[in-house]
Amino acid sequence: MLIIELAPLENGGHNNQWSDSPMLVPSGWAVVPEGLEEEAKGYLPYIVLTVEGGQITGVAQSAITPPLPPPPPNTHEFLLGFMGVTDDD
């Protein structure tokens, strides 16, 4: 059994969980129908879900969205912090 969180993560991927035994499906997640499991497995975690009435009815490959790099630090603040100087000093 494969379940997938319906809401994508910030990077476009989806949380997912496999189990060989029945499990309770958390709110916001759905079971992938057995006929779609193999196809979905090839797309995870970057998958487009077609959902109707809270049920997954289709899957497709989604584009991988790389995480954005962190913004560069303010050089002045970075150097003061590196030297252990704070605004309170």
Image (cartoon, rainbow, N blue to C red):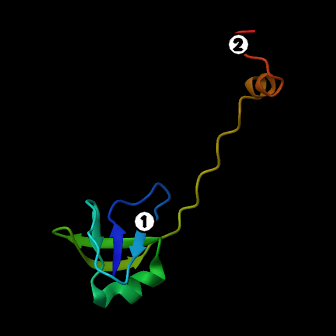
Amino acid type at circle 1 is: Asn
Q: Is residue 33 left or right of residue 52?
A: right
Q: Quadrant of the C terminus?
A: top right
50 vs 2, nearest the viewer? 2
Instruction: Give x and y (percent) for residue 51.
Output: 24, 71
- Which residue is located at x 27 percent, y 83 percent? 33
Residue that badge 2 annotates: 87
- Mark 2, secondary structure of its residue: loop
C-alpha distance separating marks 2 and 1: 41 Å
Instruction: Give x and y (percent) for residue 24.
Output: 26, 69
| Residue 85 image-quadrant placement | top right
When the figure is inspected, residue 27 is found, relative to residue 36, above or below; the finding is above
15 vs 73, nearest the viewer? 15
Instruction: Give x and y (percent) for residue 43.
Output: 46, 79
Q: Is residue 44 left or right of residue 53?
A: right
Circle 1 packing at 10 Å, graded few (<14), some (14-19), many (20+), is some
- Which residue is located at x 76 percent, y 28 percent? 78
Residue that badge 1 annotates: 15
Q: Is residue 51 left or right of residue 44?
A: left
Instruction: Give x and y (percent) for residue 49.
Output: 33, 72
Q: Sequence-wise, which precedes: disc 2 or disc 1?
A: 1
| Residue 36 image-quadrant placement | bottom left
Give the farthest residue toward the top. 89
Residue 64 bears which disc, if any? none
Amino acid type at circle 2 is: Asp
The reply to whether the C-beta atoms of the residues labelled 2 and 1 are less than 8 Å apart is no
Q: Quadrant of the N terminus?
A: bottom left
54 vs 49, nearest the viewer? 54
Q: Is residue 24 left or right of residue 38?
A: left
- Mark 1, secondary structure of its residue: loop
62 vs 5, nearest the viewer? 5
When the figure is inspected, residue 32 is found, relative to residue 38, above or below; the finding is above
